[in-house]
Amino acid sequence: MQAKETVFADLMQGRTQQFQVPLYQRTYSWSEKQLAQLWNDVLEQAELLDSGASASTHFLGSVVLAPSPQNEATFPRWLVVDGQQRLTTLSLALMAIRDHIAEDKPDEAERIDEEYLINKRKRGDEYFRLLPTQADRPQFATHVRGPLTERTARDRVAAAYQFFRRKLDEADAAAGTQDILHIEQAITSRLTLVVVSAERGDNVHRIFESLNNTGLKLSQADLLRNYLFMCLPTHGERIYETYWLPLQASLTNDELEQLMWLQLVLDGDDRVRRQDLYAAQQKRFEGGERGKGRTEADIETYIRELHRRSALFRKVIHPEEESAPAVRGHLRRLNDWQAVVTYPALMLLLERRASGELDDEETVRALSYVESFLVRRTICRVNTNNLNRIFQAVPAQLPREVPVADGLHQLLSADNRQWPADEELRDKIRTAPFYQYGRPSQRKLVLQRLEESFEHPEPVAFDEARLTIEHVMPQSPGDEWLRILRAEVAEGESPEDLHSRLQHTLGNLTLTGVNAELSNHPFERKQGLLNGSHLEMNRRIAATGRWGSAEILARADDLADRAIGLWPAPLRGVGRAERSRDWSLAHQVLAALPHGTWTSYGDLAAYIGSGPQAVGNHLAKADGVANAYRVLNADGKVADGFRWTGQDHGDVRVRLGADGIHFTATGAADAAQRLTSRDLALLVVGTEEEEDEEGGVGETARAGADEPGVETRAARFLRQLAADDTPATVAAVSELIAGWERLGGWAGHGDGEVTTSAFLMLGSAGGPGRGIWPMVLYPGSGREGSAEVVFQHLAKREPFTERSLRAELLCRINELEGVSLPQGKLELRPGFRLSVLEDERNRELLMETLGWFRDRWEESRAV
């Protein structure tokens, strides 16, 4: 691989060649913000040229090139691995200049064409010096062959071209044609690029991944698409045109990413997070259940399935595309509910219907359970925090031994799913302040559905009607309303109390298009307006002689009857919903074991919710489970009677050694390389603990959280540490914290009463998401205290998103005597005993490392 600094003119002109943007690259995406910044840089250089200033350049960025598989000695072709946005933008700017001067300076316009934009004697795609990805190619080619008279932007390519035409018109009005040529010179000769040229045999995917897998440049869908087409060297063009372009045309990038995540969930991964989509799918391709790795056929099958499922997904997000009216009605209501969390279940149902397992009637029944689950929980004020997990688990947990709709009914009815039964629903409709829970649009949908239950011969066109929720007994009652309530109060209750208890309940709410006219008026005045309403529920309210507590509760009972009829109840006595694919989960986490790590039967059992003996029995019988031989006894030794399943791979200890696992003199695997059940959880699904920790450390003594006269958190930490560690260790830790503060850091302490902690923090105190910390110190709670190096946390914080920086941090910490953190835990949170800090040289080395850590962080903030 070679790198050199150059300018656009030297890169593009002087010979017949082509720069090809690969299929895996995203489409051109620069917006006016990036274009304006570039234009300002170009103008600055053009002004320097106007003034005759000495040579000056502006660094634009890098371009990474690799030889194209279609390369020829007489016609060099290069793949643009990185930098297509820059090259496309500069080319569009030159097209705009060419067209701007074409009438007055045709020779100059022709020169720009031949030097930078075209291969004059070539035909077809070879005619273009830069060949964008297929989705951008027609529009880009049209502009190369310009000039265009139409100025309406159809996409980002057209918008960029028109941006430069506008800016050139402005520049020309202020100066003249000669200045426009200075702008051309600034673009071609004063903007420098670092061009990195890969050679045949270089791993282009790894180069691209290192450049872009930071979470800043590309979305998860972009990264996965790039990976897919890098893995299709021979069939990429056909697969792109047959499947990917239609897929890309039917879904936005965000919708496509959501579908990619849903595909993982539908295929059994009920724990993957959307933000981990790229890594999870890549791991599936490269590891697989049997560790065979991916082939082009595997990639094509994946893309073909994605294309097939996109038609189903469009029905979920665009219900009007569903042909069956009853199915369409349920999908529309769920879409209006903004029930994104239900997508795994909806996709599963539509997929089972497409395969013939469900007909329309059974699909409607299953969808009614999903709708009921959401509506009943909202009416009964059940917390929504676990909805994501509940519906993401549906594909993995749905029983196979019963029909689909029955299985879904059974699954959602589990005790731990909290689907309210009829008794609870009836009670909450009478008593719960419905108006104060859920989204306003969801409350409106509940009332709309209740109105539809009256089956009025002339139903309301709710999509057109501008209806809002009305409190029949107003929120600010006058004397007449309070007089009505005074006659109905319970002992010890005031009219105001009764009003407060009833005002927001469902029995007192309705829909109306004349909310302002109804206002806080007495009921008699409201009756006339409600009686003239097209809504049946309003006419029934108007037909009531008065409106007090009894009437509100009576209407609540009527609405409860209707709600019970509309939204099916859960089954009784189902028990808890349990994972039905525990062994698949075990296979998944074993496939993800990093090089140089092992786990025990007990750790794996704790992670999947099983027992060590059951795990051992399963692994002994299951064929082809990746890394099954890296599950050892708790003491780090191979289980007695271990036998390979399937092919014999020889001495298991030799195989373990080849995987980077070290053995002690007693023949036990290094305990530092063992992954606990917590490590396994972090490895596969990450953790939510980090936010809790940040929230805790935000309330520190520094932030004023400690109360006068109460033991401070810092003092509690040292007291708890002293309970299990020596005075020398306590003194060493105190010295470490003091040294950290001299470096500009601060110590944040958790608020645990039983066991607290100390975070070595940089940045602001406050809420979650602020600051960064390299390690957390813990008292022992019956054993020696420990320091946990939070690589998992750092992987999400700049600049330590760079794996090489985390690896350097690990190497520096391993210089301490008695510390040996394995490379396999570079994505986790390994630790070491605090007692090693009793050694003065160890403390010096750690302080040097912490100083290095602070410097890297401050440098990243200064950029």
Image: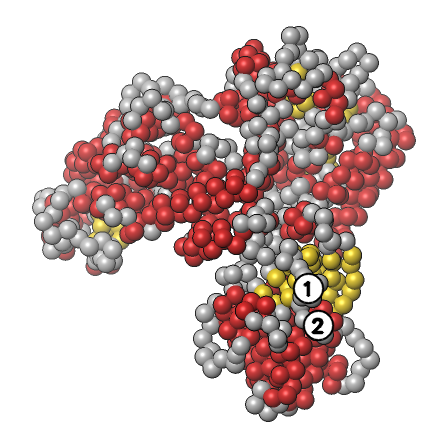
* Left or right of 677 in this view: 454: left
Q: Which residue is drawn at 45% across and 53% down?
A: 242
Residue type indicated by callout 2 = Arg
* CA neighbours of label 1 inside 10 A, class few (<14), some (14 to 19), many (20+): some
**Residue 18 is at least partly visible in this image:** yes
Label whose residue precedes the other's in the sequence (2 or 1)? 2
Q: Determine the secondary structure under disc 2.
A: loop
Q: Residue at x 30, y 51 (%)?
A: 321
Q: Is residue 780 above or below residue 458?
A: above
Quarter of the rendering containing residue 820: top right
Q: Nearer the viewer, residue 688 or 810?
A: 810
Residue 51 sits above or below residue 516 on the image:
below
| Residue to which mark 2 is pinned | 15
In the image, residue 254 above or below residue 817: below
Find numbered disc 1 in the image and state the secondary structure of the residue it sits on.
loop
Query: x, y percentage for residue 372?
Result: 29, 35
> In the shown orientation, is residue 640 left or right of residue 254?
right
Q: Residue at x 45, y 40 (%)?
A: 263
In which quarter of the view is residue 88 placed? bottom right
Labels 2 and 1 touching (C-beta < 8 A): yes
Say which of 542 and 706 sits in front: 542
Q: Which amino acid does label 1 sit on?
A: Pro
Other residues around mark 2 within 10 Å, as few (<14) / some (14–19) / many (≥20): some
Q: Position of residue 314 (x, y in %)?
A: 36, 49
Residue 634: which quarter of the image?
top right
Can you say which quadrant of the picture contains the C terminus?
bottom right
Nearer the observer, 715 or 286: 286
Q: Name the residue under label 1.
A: 76
